[in-house]
Image (cartoon, coloured by chain):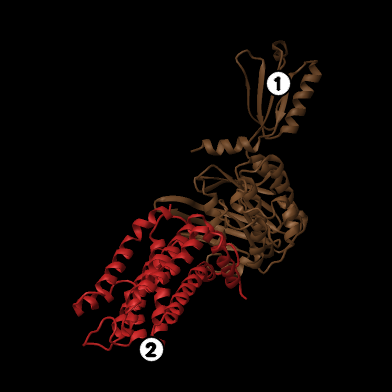
Chain colours: A red, B brown
Amino acid sequence: MNMAMRHGVLEIRLLFRRKTTAFAASVLPIGLCVLTWFTVRNRAPESWGSLVSDRFVMLMLLSVFMTSMTVYTARRQSLVLKRLRTSELTDAGVITAITMPVVTMGVAQVLVYVVFCLVVGAPMPAHPWLLLLGLASGLLTTVAAGMAIAAVSRSVEATPVTAFPVIVATLAGLFMQDAPDAAVVASGVMLPLIGPADLVAKGWSGYDAGATLTSMPPPLLGLASTLLWAAVFAAVIARFFRWEPRA
Amino acid sequence: MTAATGAAFAVRGSFVGMEDDIVIEISLLRFSYDTFAAVDGVDLTVRRGEIFALLGTNGAGKTTTLELVEGFRRPESGTVRVLGHDPARARSLLKPRMGMMLQHAGLIEELSVFETLKLWGSLTTRSDDVEELLDRIELVHRRDTRVEQLSGGEKRRLDFALAIYGRPELIVLDEPTTGLDPESRQRLWQTVERLRDSGSTILLTTHYLEEAESLADRVAIMHQGRISVAGTLPEVLGTRPSRITARVPASALERALPAFAGALKSTLDDTGALLVLETTALQEDLGALLRWAGDGGIELDRLTASQASLAEIFLTVGANR
């Protein structure tokens, strides 16, 4: 195991020492499972795609995004990132190690939720590869979003303000998915984290689920949105990321 | 100013090649934070196997200089060579050979002392005995205590242990003894000296002048981003005159004072009885004064003779703003 992996494993163990993070990490998927249990009855099989994609966005936003943003900001503020750079870890290794617990937590939460859905009667996904692509790209984009917001936040205390645009835009995109007008739904897909959700919906329930545009093949809109936001977050990270607190 | 660059003479008296001898070489180094020139044309050389102390007031540019040496910042102009490499470009090559202690620890608060050392061991190719290291920093009794529960001094000692883990070839310490009690400071100094004796090169910054006086083979005093004075302790102390003072009976002054070889200034106070002599030849001029007094049967009252102190030079540098 290389140095970054060793440190990453330790960071995962540390996740359980932070009571609030451990609590949020366990309660959220359980809460979503309970919520799904109460809303699942009498659902048509084709509606599972949008249900799972909605819950997936909530999970990413409330758990992975918040944790990622807080971890990067706190680790920078307490100079841990700078100290780790004095070790033999490469810069990429430091980021990998700090990111590992967030990704692990996200994967575990998604797995719990997906398995729960299958257990309580969801049909098998129509396009597993697309579902997997949506889940993986959603997770990575969310981690990048958290890192980007950490990059523009002076302190942990400032993150509720700096994260506000991402949270509002994502929730707006989520609500727009229920609109009767196809153009509104398609516009919503272009908002952050909704692109991967669209891929999840189509991956689970087929190409008729989620946004439908006659002008392009079904998964293309979600894919374009995912790539666009991945590029935006990467650009913000490249421009603003610092290893130590801003003076 | 005594130039830090000089003949290839290694510490502990052996001649070695110039290139092998130099561990850190800084030339005309400049770095600014916006319009503030933190480092403004620094020249510095640190030789293999020596303890080099960088002194200076707050904001003098010490930490920025160290961060340039560590490769955390890129120079605006000038060059930094560490173990033959540009530290900003060759960090991956240098890190296995360097130990660093930052001004602020940056430790992971949720880890215990032992876990912190074990973690560090997993992040370096150097090896060390963690239990022995714990003993050396006097934290055996705090082995399983979380970092967040340690006192400031204990955290500093743990941070020091990370810097010296595996006895690196070059150790860079930014104010290592800040917040330590006198006993812990003494122990840390002993460890630093042992590391030097075992072949490590140490570059450190400090506010404690007695630390530099007792530890360092060479010192440099920084002020406003520049090196004001640098060299071995005798060289640095030699940049300011020594001082002889004595109270001379008024009757004795009928005899002319002797000629002082190194006198820069000699004054008598208003009463004509207090002699203050500033000299570059302390021993010789003290001898002349004592002979003069002995020959004339003159009793010198409150006779003092002292070399300039590092504190005096530090304050003089600070006063020359």
Residue B297 percent coordinates (x, y): 80, 15
The image shows residue B293 at horizontal and vertical percentages of 77, 19
Q: Which of B208 and A37 lies nearest the eye of the viewer?
A: A37
SS state under label 1: strand
Task: Tell me the tag on residue A19.
Answer: none
Left or right for A200, reference A9: left
| Three-letter amino acid code at the position of disc 1 | Ala
Marks counted in the figure total 2
Q: Quadrant of the rendered structure where residue B285 is? A: top right
Q: Nearer the viewer, residue A63 or A55?
A: A55
Q: Mark 2 is on which residue type? A: His
Q: Which residue is mark 1?
A: B246
Quadrant in which residue B20 is drawn: bottom right
| Residue at screen point 41% across, 70% down | A34
Q: Is residue B29 above or below residue A193?
A: above
Q: Is residue B200 visible?
A: yes
Q: Position of residue B33 (x, y in %)?
A: 43, 53
In the rendered view, tell whether residue B226 sits above or below residue A104: above
